[in-house]
Amino acid sequence: MKIVVAMSGGVDSSVAAYLLKQQNHEVVGVTLKLWGKESDSGCCSVSDVEDARRVAIRLGIDHRVMYFADLFEERVVEPYIHSYEVGQTPNPCIECNRHIKFSALYERVIKLGFDALATGHYCRTEKLDNGYVLRRALDKAKDQSYVLSMLTTDKIERLLFPVGSMLKTQVREIAKEIGLPVASKPDSQDVCFISSTEGRKGFLQQRMPLTSGTFVDENNNILTGVEDIELFTVGQRFKVPPGALGERRYVISVNRDEKKVVIGPMRRLLVNGVKLREMSWALKIPERKQEVFLQTSAHGSPFKAFYEGGNLFIFKDPQKRVAPGQTVAVYDGKDPEIVLGSGIALPDIVKLDGA
Amino acid sequence: MKIAYLDHAATSPLRPSARKAIEDFWSEFVGNPTGSHFLARKARAYLEQSREKIANFLGGKESEIIFTGSGTESDNLAIKGYIRTVEAGKKVFVSAIEHRAVLNAAKAACEETGCSLSLIPVDKNGVVDLNWINDNLDDGVCFVSVMAVNNEIGTIEPLSEIKEILTEKAPHAVLHTDAVQAACWLDMVGLWQVVEMMSLGAHKFGGPLGIGVLAKKDDVKIKPILHGGSQEKELRAGTQNVAGAIGMAEAIQDLKSNWETYLTTTKELRDELTENILSELDFAYETVERQFKVPGNSHILIDGVEPEELLWLLDESHVCISTGSSCASGALTPSHVLEAIGVTPRRNLSALRMTLGWSTQKEEIEHATQAIVAAANKLREKG
């Protein structure tokens, strides 16, 4: 097959390219130029492109760079900033997957006559009777199906994730064995367009005013002042003197207009369900009352819920409210490794009577 | 598969005569041209002979020729070298469509010395606005740099007219021209009469990579940007690239030998290429009017096609052209030249630069035409 491998310059995508070349596919490595406008640090900098190029040369494959920086700014960076402005929790990696990697890049790859797009994500694909779905990676600790949960059958059919059925340790072994220049390069952890020196606060400060306000408890008593309420997320642990009962406190809500962050115990965070927007289903919409598993963060534990039709899910047991803007990945109730689809949490608080 | 190489403005193949001259030089050992013994003097002789040939090409004197490592280095030497001699508060003008070497060297030099930098606007054909120069020029302007030929769109700039205005309004200002793209096409003797400094780069006209020239009138004082030994009259330290100088001089001799014919033939090939593509693609347009351009440059805009995708398909057909301008990572970035002439950058607007040179054959034109038309049609229907 003719395959494009998206190469970030990191170990996973490098080994993915190697594995495909070993299988005698016609492989071309592509690195995306997404950022690097002002500070060329973070991911996809010139040095990352150089890393990817060196790996490609070592593997004997052609390497190209594709420019998507303007689209990235429009569909990933600006919405990221906007989310904070409206008190939501953005997930830029998911937006990048949605609009850039598995949209603009994917479409271009097919247009240019390639058979498939491959990446170094930890995830697997599976062919069912009626189409293609994603299955969690073999290495559960590295599973990235959550950030890929927006993908649908027509795209999954032409995607390859060569390292998805391997353990991370195996991947690093291979990289070392074949002497890849990036074998011991550490995994990138942060948002790729925010440099480790400036941090999230530094990045946002330059682009929007951060509001100072107060932390208050459920009775509106002021607990302490805060400089940047936008940086707090619903459900986050609040680490200041414990409340009267000595129990843990969490962010219950963030109100930019009133300049308040309400803090309270876990029970104030518990809700019975979630409503989603921008839902996508890999194959088909679930049946009403179908049992599913929901995962609400990249490494969160999935929990049981029921699909109520439309955009509503009711949890089997009360759970922490999902922060608005957070992606909710939906997994099959019978085979919880299979991704059914995903959506983005709305701010609606879903409580059942008597709850 | 055959290759169609239409990127001479980026670099051109080494002329056989230049190659032979360099190989002959490499087969004998000579010393360092700065030294004193007979072998060193032999090297010196080769260097000076090359200098003489280049001086003749410009109708100038040997004392006016400084060897550098590239056209970019020549630009840097001219610009930083001159601006560093003036006092703070002076003004510098460069055209809005200069090569990055000129723009960035000028920015750096002005920041360093406390001078101000202004960009001379251009019209939709890339020609500098002479009225703007006339209106804004005064004795506070110490340095003006306008390229002789633009590397992207091929526009020829009116250096004589600029000089006239300077003589009247800012007689003390120094006029520099980046002539790196001009050597094949213009009357270089006439050009040298008009400017005070001129940058040349050998690899654009069939000479080797790694050698350039800054031509400088004797009465213009500049500071060196490389310090060390006293080579090139203390203006460019470092052992000279004798092989490069020989290759450059030889390429120039070759260029001169059939110049008139070369101009005519190239123009015909360029016109054929441009017209054939435009007649097949009704969503393609010529960027700049041909009367303002050098004969070797064809530049078109193709609507509804993304440049990276076009380049990809042309790669498969072994057609080498340039779209937009490139950056350090290898991706394509929008062009400041196109923006300056009023072309708004868009994702699905491809700018194609096809530049011909001494080695261009008719077959390459035909091959490229076919490939470009096929690729553009394919991408446009899928787009």
Image (cartoon, rainbow, N blue to C red):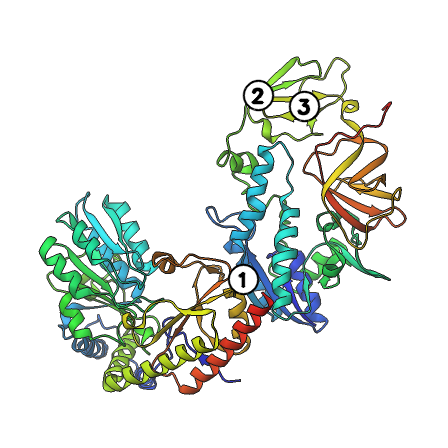
Which picture quadrant has residue A295? top right
Whether callout 2 and callout 3 share a subunit is answered: yes
**Amino acid type of disc 2?**
Gly
Which picture quadrant has residue B382? bottom right
**Amino acid type of disc 1?**
Val
Nearer the observer, B256 or B28: B256
Q: Position of residue A332 (x, y in %)?
A: 85, 48
Horizontal side of B280 relative to B89 (left or right) equals: right
Horizontal side of B232 relative to A103 (left or right) equals: left
Q: Nearer the viewer, mark 2 or mark 3?
A: 2
Examine the rendered structure and indicate whether residue B274 appears above or below residue B230.
below
Whether callout 3 and callout 1 share a subunit is answered: yes
Q: Position of residue A207 (x, y in %)?
A: 49, 36
How far apart are the two marked residues, 3 and 1, measured between alpha carbons?
45 Å
**Amino acid type of disc 3?**
Lys
| Classed neighbour count for the residue bearing mark 2: other residues with Cα under 10 Å, few (<14), some (14–19), many (≥20) | many
Q: Earlier in the sequence, mark 2 or mark 1?
A: 1
Examine the rendered structure and indicate whether residue A71 appears above or below residue B232.
above
Nearer the observer, B66 or B270: B270
Find numbered disc 2 in the image and state the secondary structure of the residue it sits on.
strand
Q: Which residue is mark 2?
A: A213
What residue is drawn where x is 77% and y is 14%? A245
Q: Nearer the viewer, mark 2 or mark 1?
A: 2
Q: Which residue is mark 1?
A: A65
Q: Which residue is mark 3?
A: A239
How far apart are the two marked residues, 2 and 1, measured between alpha carbons?
45 Å
Disc 1: host chain: A
Which picture quadrant has residue B267? bottom left
Find numbered disc 1 in the image and state the secondary structure of the residue it sits on.
strand
Q: Earlier in the sequence, mark 3 or mark 1?
A: 1
Circles 2 and 3 in contact, beta carbons < 8 Å: no
